[in-house]
Amino acid sequence: MGSRRVLVTGCSSGIGLAVAVRLAKDETKRFKVVATMRDLEKRGPLEKAAGDLLNKTLVIQKLDACCEESIKECINSIPNRQVDVLVNNAGIGMIGPLECQSITSMKELFEVNFFGLVRLVKEVLPDMKQRQSGHIVVMSSVMGIQGLLFNDIYSASKFAVEGFCESLAVQAMKFNIKTTLVEPGPVMTEFERKLYEDAEKTDLSETDEETARIFRDIYLPYSRKVFTTLGQTPEDVAEQTHKVITAKEPPLRHQTNRLYMPMTALKHADPTGRLPLEAFYKMIFKHDAVFNATLGILRMMNWRKGNK
């Protein structure tokens, strides 16, 4: 069948970089990777990680997911515009009390996380339909399944991504195009580190004292514990993304972190929504000892898994 051409967005760091390199290093050389980023001045870490693969099984190109002209220019530069696999990874985060977020920043987040995906799919889908083949892989999040405290806008963007892909997947099947939502939980990247570092400096003057206290004294320490216990590396997510792309029948949804699954499973266990809502409320506000004990058990499970 020859090499499949894969376009990956957001490759300057983190998951995008790891996915691009993992596919370029595929043992049977099944892929030619077009690793893209908005700012080519940030290509250094990717070039270093790619090593000898650079300009062989991996090339680096500019692509701004917020600009239709940039997307079109990148796709047009690919021979026959042939993108066999699209891996949409580019995204930004937002954490904090709703009252402290501007509508402008919320729109910017949706421009990247949701409309960036839509622009890319809109550009590659007609060619995939014509070829009667293709795979659209979208880096979503468990927060596209289950909302999380103080992640209101980010979670909303991922819910939008999930609804868009789930709807489009039905039509895509008619043209033999696969769709997969990769749903990581916490991932330890520079992106996440800076996001939480900035969150600690959030101006909380626009919200009430109790909400500010909850964010500062409960949510941020809670998040640090969750990342320490459940956090994956970008390489872990990249390995699972590689398996999804090479699967004979790739799934519509794939959660990368088995330790996080009990939390998302609560949503499906009760159609009324009360069970996950009350569970999260009690875990955060009433049963801190239970929460810490649960994380302790999960930490032990993670340790055992790593030492097998």
Image (spheres, rainbow, N blue to C red):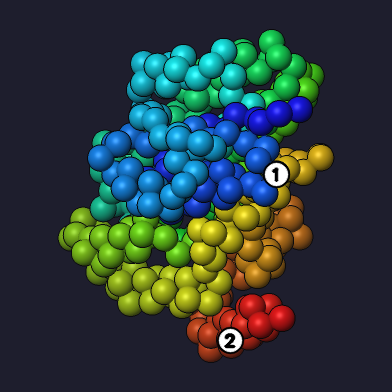
x and y percentages locating residue 302 in the rendered image: 63, 78
Q: Nearer the viewer, residue 36 or 162?
A: 36
Q: Amino acid at mark 1?
A: Thr
Q: Report whether residue 167 is seen.
A: no
Q: Is 301 or 8 nearer to us in this picture?
A: 8
Residue drawn at the location 41% of the way across and 35% of the way down:
60
Is tag 1's residue or tag 2's residue first in the polypeptide sequence?
1
Above or below: residue 244 compared with residue 177: below
Residue found 43% across the figure and 70% down from its top: 223
In this picture, is 45 found above or below 60? below
The alpha-carbon separation of the residues under discs 1 and 2 comes to 40 Å
The circle drawn on residue 28 is 1
Disc 2 crowd, CA 10 A, few/some/many (<14, 14-19, 20+): some
With 174 as the anchor, is 299 left or right in this view? Answer: left
Q: Examine the image and state in which quarter residue 214 appears.
A: bottom left
Q: Closest to the observer: 105 or 169?
A: 169
For residue 17, side relative to residue 80 (left or right): left
